[in-house]
Image (cartoon, grey):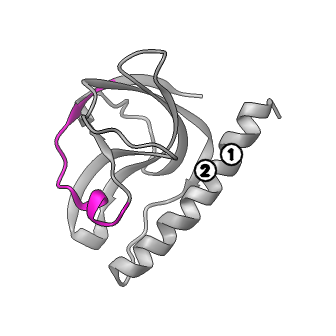
Amino acid sequence: MKSFTARTIRGAGRGKGLQYPTINLDLRDVPADIEDGIYACLAILDDEANTRNAVVHVGPRPVFQDDRSFEVHLLDSDVQTSPEQVTVTLIGERIREIRDFPSVDALTQAIKEDIVAARAMLSTHASGD
């Protein structure tokens, strides 16, 4: 498991528009050895008492022809105000590589599938398997 703490930055707001809001992290704080892709993670928002299950996207955003980013989508929770920093612990193996999709709808379907996979990995991690 890889853990690190990063400062948050303002994103473009696309995740919220897709109904999957994200917290964007400053890439300067993200370890360079994390391969681009989708991961399950535990996210600690500012302090240990605020730990959430999440799914992470790290890499370029080809559907939007946009640069590399590190985005955290919290599962089953929402935050009104972005935290100052987030501590991320990646759980398990990468769910998938970054792919281009022919449409935003196809991307949204892939996000749904990524969340199902992340939940399964987080559930297995929580049960100690």
Residue holding disc 2? 118
The foreground one among 46 and 110 is 46
Residue holding disc 1? 121
Q: Residues within 10 Å of mark 1 (few under 14, many from 20)?
A: some
Q: Residue 108 lies in what quarter of the image?
A: bottom left
Q: Check the image and report above or below for 35 versus 1.
A: below
Q: Is residue 8 magenta?
A: yes
Residue drawn at (64%, 49%) of the image: 119
Residue drawn at (20%, 56%) of the image: 13
* Quadrant, the N terminus: top right
Q: Residue 81 lies in what quarter of the image?
A: top left
Q: Residues within 10 Å of mark 2 (few under 14, many from 20)?
A: many
Left or right of residue 128, residue 32 in this image: left
Q: Residue 8 lies in what quarter of the image?
A: top left
Q: In the orientation shown, which residue stands out farthest toward the top?
A: 48
**Where does residue 23 sit, x and y in percent of width and height?**
31, 42
Q: Check the image and report above or below for 22 versus 34.
A: below
The foreground one among 90 and 31 is 90
Q: Could you tell me the amino acid type at mark 2?
A: Ala
Residue 107's mark?
none
Q: Could you tell me the amino acid type at mark 1?
A: Met
**Where does residue 69 sit, x and y in percent of width and height?**
28, 48
Q: In the orientation shown, which residue stands out farthest toward the front?
A: 80
Q: CA distance from mark 1 to mark 2?
A: 5 Å
Which span is picked out in magenta? 6-19
Secondary structure of the residue carrying tag 1 is helix
**Where does residue 58 sit, x and y in percent of width and height?**
38, 48
CB of mark 1 within 8 Å of CB of mark 2?
A: yes
